[in-house]
Image: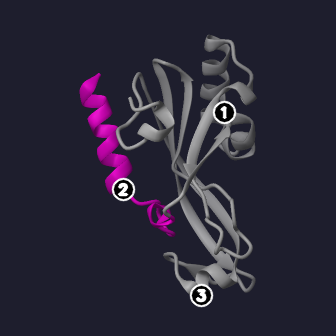
Amino acid sequence: MKRTAIVFAALLLTEPAQGFDTRQLGQVGSTDMEDLAPLVAKTPKLKAEVDLARAEVKKEEVQVKCAGPRFPGPWKELNGVRVAPYLCKFADDKWLLIRADVRVIDKRGRAFEKPSKQAMKHAVDVTETKLRWEWSAKPPEGWGWFTGGR
């Protein structure tokens, strides 16, 4: 189990989202599985796993608490939007980490690779594709603020 947590932490801290590097946003926010449902539904296998996990712990979508990076105030059009990676707590011993390829674009469809003044001013949309996920009995390191210091 400890090895799994170490692997999770290593993946979270070293693997940037493909495309736009969300690790540089510098802000994280909480949400719930209900807000992530449209994203999860795009991948039938993930949706089935999430539905099964919710049934096992007897929780509605809104009761499964999640967190992920979010665009801070200076992002004109994207302020507050959350993006992968997401960490969701189904139970004390059931955690889900979701990663995705993130693309941030302007109104002409031009992509930004990282946060910049230009991106903050002109970005209007975010897409998340190629979802990858991992289940664990313990949360990965680096999410202490969300996990209560675990």
Q: Position of residue 123 (x, y in %)?
A: 67, 78
For the magenta stretch, what is the residue range?
1-25
The mark nearer the N terminus, 3 or 1, is 1
Residue 88 placement: quadrant: top right
The relative height of residue 36 versus residue 4 in the rendered view (above or below) is: below
- The residue labelled by disc 3 is 118
- Asked if disc 2 and disc 1 are in contact, CB closer than 8 Å, the reply is no
Q: Position of residue 143 (x, y in %)?
A: 43, 41
Is residue 118 found left or right of 6 in the rendered image?
A: right
- The residue labelled by disc 2 is 15
Q: Amino acid at mark 3?
A: Gln
Closer to the camera in the image, 91 or 49: 91
Q: Position of residue 48 (x, y in %)?
A: 65, 27
Question: Residue, x 69% and y 60% (percent of image)?
Answer: 80
- Asked if disc 3 and disc 1 are in contact, CB closer than 8 Å, the reply is no
Q: Amino acid at mark 1?
A: Lys
Gap between marks 3 and 1 measured at Cα: 36 Å
Question: Residue, x 60% and y 81% (percent of image)?
Answer: 119
User: Please, what secondary structure does the residue beneath circle 1 have?
Assistant: helix
Q: Amino acid at mark 2?
A: Glu
For discs 3 and 2, the disc positioned in front in the rendered view: 3
Question: Residue, x 74% and y 73% (percent of image)?
Answer: 77
Residue 34 placement: quadrant: top right
Closer to the camera in the image, 23 or 73: 73
Chief secondary structure of the magenta span? helix
Residue 116's label in the rendered image is none
For discs 3 and 1, the disc positioned in front in the rendered view: 3
Question: Residue, x 68% and y 36% (percent of image)?
Answer: 32
- The residue labelled by disc 1 is 47
